[in-house]
Image (spheres, helix red, strand yellow):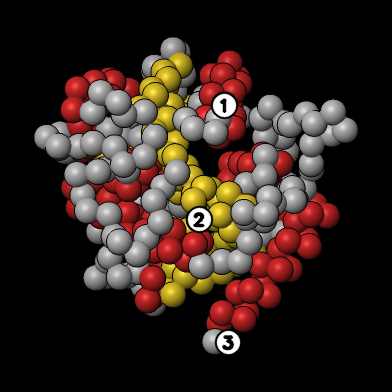
Amino acid sequence: MRTSLRVLAALASALALHAAAQPTPDAEGALPDMPAARAPSSAELGVQTVEIPRASMKDAEDAPQTLTAYWVASPVKAPATGAPVVIALHGCSGLYTQAGADAKALGSRYRGYAQWLGARGYAVVFPDSFGPRGKPHGICTERTATRDINGAVRRADVLATIRWVAGQPGVDARRIVLLGWSNGAQAVLEAVDASRAWPADTPAINRAVAFYPGCASAQKRPDYRLNAPLLLLAGGNDDWTQADHCQALQTAVLARQPQARFELDMFGGAYHGFDGTAPVKERNGIPKGRRYGTVTVGGDPAAREAAFGKLAAWLDAPHP
């Protein structure tokens, strides 16, 4: 009971802090097209650290005692039905900068998105799949086939977070959105796989967004289908998670589910991480099959602008 009261108090505090720190639509109702060039600090966002209890994590045998997550309330007054919530899933580098592994060290990408989503009325929660398992700064250099934090583990974290969100006051559990980047986008693909049974005690996903996931694993499943509308955004020049696998996945899914909502947008010339503002650079030491290699990462201004336009339309549509 004490833990629940602490969480409720934290969320109430977050609402007060966040309302003071976050931008809201202007007098004419305009919303920010993209996250600001400078992401607000965690203190400015009113980020609250919460702990999702082990009891919510029954889908994973190796689950930690608690799953750390970060809650960012929206400054926009929620409708009577409650606020919609985005569950945002980090990439293989984890949630943090090298400065630490707590709320103060949340990466600028995640803080920027939280501000942008908050202005649109969404509360945001970032579950940390790596920190509680002893790898706060990521698994990017681990070979995919030998990772112990794999797709099944991250799917279990998604399910636990959905259950936790649904139990919070002032939340509309019918409007839970999944949003992930890279390894987190692969977790989105795991969660929306309708060929796997969905737990009866877990609210359904309203819609999902995957930024540049690795689609090869899902593509290889002979019965992969969708249990929620999916927007997938990929870079045409991505040499880390190649977009052709995602094109093949979309083709296969729509052949099995002609009525499925699976929108794939590819941005020609864009690399992995095109929605950010960092300059394009090479990243070494990335496992590629049996060897380690070099990949290209970095922002693309035109693709970034187009992607946020797609994302805004996807989130704002009553029925995607």
Q: Position of residue 311 (x, y in %)?
A: 54, 29
Mark 2 falls on what kind of element?
strand
The quarter of the rendered structure image containing the N terminus is bottom right
Mark 3 falls on what kind of element?
helix
Q: Residue furthest left?
A: 222
Q: Residue at x 41, y 18 (%)?
A: 266
Mark 1 falls on what kind of element?
helix
Circle 1 crowding by C-alpha within 10 Å: few under 14, some 14–19, many from 20: few
Quarter where residue 215 is shown: top left
Circle 2 crowding by C-alpha within 10 Å: few under 14, some 14–19, many from 20: many
Q: Position of residue 128 (x, y in %)?
A: 46, 59
Of callouts 2 and 1, which one flags the residue occurring earlier in the amino acid sequence? Answer: 2
Tell me the number on the disc at residue 51: none
Tell me the number on the disc at residue 2: 3
Residue type, numbered disc 3 = Arg
Residue type, numbered disc 1 = Ala
Left or right: residue 129 versus residue 290 is right
Give the residue pinned by disc 1: 313
Observer-side mark, 2 or 1, equals 2
Left or right: residue 74 versus residue 180 is right
Whether residue 193 is visible: yes
C-alpha gap between disc 2 and disc 1: 21 Å
Q: Position of residue 158 (x, y in %)?
A: 39, 56
